[in-house]
């Protein structure tokens, strides 16, 4: 806890004002623990709801849901997400600020499609924005946009994440043409694409006038049960909370990206994404913990 809090203090000192924690059920979500870590750091934290799977839902949903033995049209699934948004996550009192869809290389499996439709329906009722996990090399976000649009979702309230794991500018332009934001959210993580090439691609998007459709983040946790911190730091030394301000922004400036474009990606776009007033009445969209837009200069 002390180590996590110190990392978050350093992040706040770098100029970041708010974090969106995209951990949802399926990834051992614990908002109360995160809130304890953020206490006293000066950071605002927003939470997410949804379910993290690349293929199948848990066993209860094998028997209950759209087309199942107990056909409730996935109302129970939707009610879980809607409760997180309207009432709060468990007994924490923290309400989810975004809904999450996950589509990886396996594609839009039947259960993942059910999840996507459930999220789209809750989005339509509450106006809460949607952030997605999308496997960029296989262009999975286009399936997500198709499902969301078919349920009447506002694609302008959707951010397609992990987009820096491709160099295909045409694909990224398709996401933007569909109305969604591009989440450049694995900054410092070079698995699919080298970091220098990621910078080149992002600078290319800015050169084409798309800085107003991109948001930056790390997809980084202080601790994970997948690998030890030492193992991660050895294999991925640049994947740190400080990478955006310490390396990515200088690299973008070297490639001709302006301070205005950087401010747009770090501050203007998140403020627009979370601060829009269209959709359902404000009473149907309760604020989440720290859901205020970041102050100018924040990340």
Image (tube, rainbow, N blue to C red):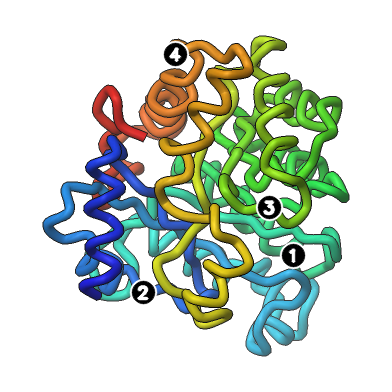
Q: Nearer the viewer, residue 49 or 18?
A: 18
Location of residue 113 by image quarter: bottom right
Pinpoint residue 164: horizontal percent, then vertical percent: 69, 41
Pinpoint residue 213: horizontal percent, then vertical percent: 59, 23
Q: Nearer the viewer, residue 72 or 269?
A: 269
Identified at 26% across, 36% down, the residue is 292
Q: Quadrant of the N terminus?
A: bottom left
In this view, 197 is above or below 95: above
Q: The residue tagged with tag 4: helix, strand or loop?
A: helix
Distance in Å between CA atoms under marks 1 and 3: 27 Å
Name the mark nearer the viewer: 4 or 1: 4
Q: Earlier in the sequence, mark 3 or mark 4?
A: 3
Identified at 29% across, 67% down, the residue is 4
Distance in Å between CA atoms under marks 2 and 1: 23 Å
In this view, 51 is above or below 70: above
Q: Which residue is mark 3?
A: 190
Q: The residue tagged with tag 3: helix, strand or loop?
A: loop
Distance in Å between CA atoms under marks 2 and 3: 27 Å
Q: Which mark is residue 112?
A: 1
Q: Earlier in the sequence, mark 1 or mark 3?
A: 1
Q: Earlier in the sequence, mark 2 or mark 1?
A: 2
Name the mark nearer the viewer: 1 or 3: 3
Q: Quadrant of the C terminus?
A: top left
- Tell me how many marks there are: 4
Local packing at callout 3 (Cα closer than 10 Å; few below 14, some 14-19, many 20+) is some
Identified at 32% across, 68% down, the residue is 31
Q: Which residue is mark 2?
A: 30
Local packing at callout 2 (Cα closer than 10 Å; few below 14, some 14-19, many 20+) is some
Local packing at callout 4 (Cα closer than 10 Å; few below 14, some 14-19, many 20+) is few
């Amino acid at each position: 806890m002390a180590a996590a809090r110190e990392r978050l203090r350093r992040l706040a000192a770098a100029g970041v004002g708010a974090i969106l924690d995209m951990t949802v059920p399926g990834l051992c979500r614990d908002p109360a623990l995160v809130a304890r870590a953020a206490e006293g750091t000066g950071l605002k934290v927003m939470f997410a709801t949804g379910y993290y799977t690349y293929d199948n839902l848990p066993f209860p949903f094998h028997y209950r849901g759209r087309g199942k033995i107990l056909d409730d049209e996935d109302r129970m699934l939707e009610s879980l997400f809607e409760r997180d948004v309207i009432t709060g996550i468990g007994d924490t009192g923290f309400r989810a600020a975004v809904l999450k869809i996950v589509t990886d290389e396996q594609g839009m499996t039947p259960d993942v499609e059910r999840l996507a439709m459930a999220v789209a329906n809750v989005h339509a009722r509450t106006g809460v924005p949607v952030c997605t996990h999308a496997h960029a090399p296989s262009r999975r976000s286009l399936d997500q946009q198709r499902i969301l649009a078919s349920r009447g979702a506002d694609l302008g309230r959707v951010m397609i994440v992990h987009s820096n794991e491709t160099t295909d500018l045409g694909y990224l332009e398709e996401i933007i043409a569909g109305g969604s934001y591009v989440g450049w959210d694995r900054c410092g993580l070079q698995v699919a694409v080298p970091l220098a090439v990621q910078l080149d691609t992002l600078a290319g998007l800015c050169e084409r006038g798309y800085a107003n459709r991109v948001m930056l983040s790390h997809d980084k946790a202080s601790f994970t049960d997948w690998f030890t911190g030492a193992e991660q730091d050895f294999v991925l030394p640049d994947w740190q909370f400080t990478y955006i301000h310490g390396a990515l922004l200088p690299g973008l400036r070297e490639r001709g990206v302006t301070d205005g474009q950087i401010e747009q990606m770090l501050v203007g776009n998140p403020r627009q994404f979370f601060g829009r007033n269209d959709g359902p009445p404000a009473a149907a969209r309760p604020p989440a913990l720290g859901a205020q837009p970041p102050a100018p200069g924040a990340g």
